[in-house]
Amino acid sequence: MIAAAPLAYLGRQTLALLALTGQVSLFTAQGLSHIFRPPFYGREFLVALLQIGWLSLPVVGLTAFFTGGALALQIYDGSTRFSAEAVVPQIVAIGMVRELGPVLGGLMIAARVTSSIAAEIATMKVTEQIDALVTLSTHPMKYLTAPRVLAALLVVPALVGVGDVIGVFGGFIVSTQQLGFNPSTYIHNTVDFLEVRDVLSSLAKGCAFGGIAATMGCYFGMNSGRGAQGVGQATKGSVQAAAVLILAANFLLTSLFFGT
Amino acid sequence: MITLRDVHKAFGANKVLRGVDLEVPRGSSMVIIGGSGSGKSVALKCVLGLVPPDAGQILVDGKDATRGDRDAFLARFGMLFQGGALFDSLPVWQNVAFRLLRGSLKRPRDEAREIAVEKLRRVGLSPDVADLFPSELSGGMQKRVGLARAIAAEPEIIFFDEPTTGLDPIMAGVINDLIREIVTEMGATAMTITHDMTSVRAIADNVAMLYDGVIKWTGPVAEMDNSGDPYLDQFIHGRADGPIAAVR
């Protein structure tokens, strides 16, 4: 019996994970379907757009800027070992646009937006505001989930795009001010090297990561437990799930765009 | 008329409702009493469809409450929640006029605001409160705003969940009087759940006592004190000794 305990534990965890996957999938399908079915809540959509997009810009921008700068330093240091310093603009551009811009942007959104959505909706649940919505003939999925998911799907790609530009600019600043690169050559090399699919993959990742971040916040918020502990666990769970799913989705999308 | 027939509800192994039978005549005020955790809120939420019953039937004016157009069904109801359940992100007037700003009862914004201010006045709050946010209000004021929201669309049926919990005796008295006045003046059917006996006497036409998942006693409030039911007697007199275990 004692020897079987770890196996039983593993089995329970596997079943719980499968159940969670099913629940999240159904929730996502429901959330997406409500985006296209009236009534539409324009004010809630605009508020979500502002909170997810505009208010996240400083943190995403700063993350991208410092990452771009650090990337330039790393690539320069590595490439000097085989006298290939000239590739710094190209590698910074491809690194930021294809991977670091969307992934770090997505993770920053998960930290800032997913946690905030989960905590807000979980608190609404604990204080019976979700029940109040229902009694006021308002569907919580339409009023709370659909506007947030739609806003994230639309605004996070834009945020990632801006983050990509800021990241490349961070690399440009470090390369030209500290590493002695010629500014016009740096810009020329960057622009010439990037392809349309690099940018498209970045925006597609932004869209997927935004959808994941908002959906996880809404799911864990709507399904939170009671009291302060329930709100805390919903917030923590939402960020963990969003971060893992963003990284997994990144792998899948990278395979899709660039896999051979 | 609201009718509950043999309604059952369990959460896991915890059987909260074990066959509730209850009738609330149209235009009357029914108060359900019972100890904490006796299932009063669950019964109310089953009627509204917030919690689906496991078995049994819930009828509103003879129609099954779980079928048909949900929006039209809910448009007949108003509810005052225990903690107010006001939306933090909206100012008071938008909370009160929530139903009038969207959906089938939508009115122009100015008209909705006017109605909200009028309802606030009805529950004893000045128009200045309209632009405040719920977090800027005291507990008693939040209850009044919740009450204003419950009556804003002039519903036929109003539910009150622990309307006086957390209020001082004077504010509790004010809320009780308001509920009685509003229910009488609107001719609404009211269902209130509480364990505050002062509220019961102020609000109720009829009383039902829920214990161990079933209605132990029901009758007019005037007969409550002479019911001869040992459970009801123990509860209304707040005695530790009796058939209801004090330690649960």
Image (cartoon, rainbow, N blue to C red):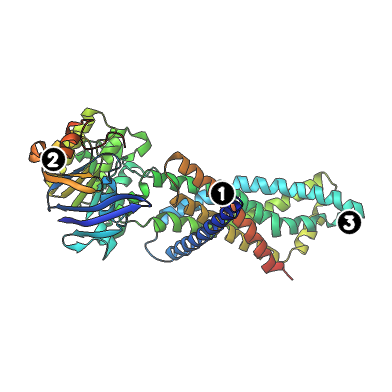
From where the camera sits, is residue A245 visible?
yes
Instruction: Give x and y (percent) for residue B161.
Output: 26, 43
Q: CA distance from mark 1 to mark 3?
A: 40 Å
View extreme (front): residue: A1
Q: Which residue is mark 2?
A: B229
Q: Callout 3: few (<14), some (14-19), or many (20+) C-alpha neighbours within 10 Å? A: few
Q: Mark 1 vs mark 3: same chain?
A: yes
Q: CA distance from mark 3 to mark 2?
A: 93 Å
- Mark identifier at residue A222: none
Q: Nearer the viewer, mark 1 or mark 2?
A: 2
* Foreground of the two, A201 or B206: B206
* Foreground of the two, B54 or A43: B54
Q: Mark 1 vs mark 2: same chain?
A: no
Q: Quadrant of the N terminus of chain B?
A: bottom left
Q: Nearer the viewer, mark 3 or mark 2?
A: 2
Q: Callout 1: few (<14), some (14-19), or many (20+) C-alpha neighbours within 10 Å? A: many
For image coordinates 24% across by 39% down, the residue present is B163
Q: Which residue is mark 1?
A: A239
Instruction: Give x and y (percent) for residue B85.
Output: 33, 43
* Foreground of the two, A153 or B211: B211
Identified by mark 1, the residue type is Val
- Mark identifier at residue A84: 3
Q: Locate residue B75: give its quadrant.
A: bottom left
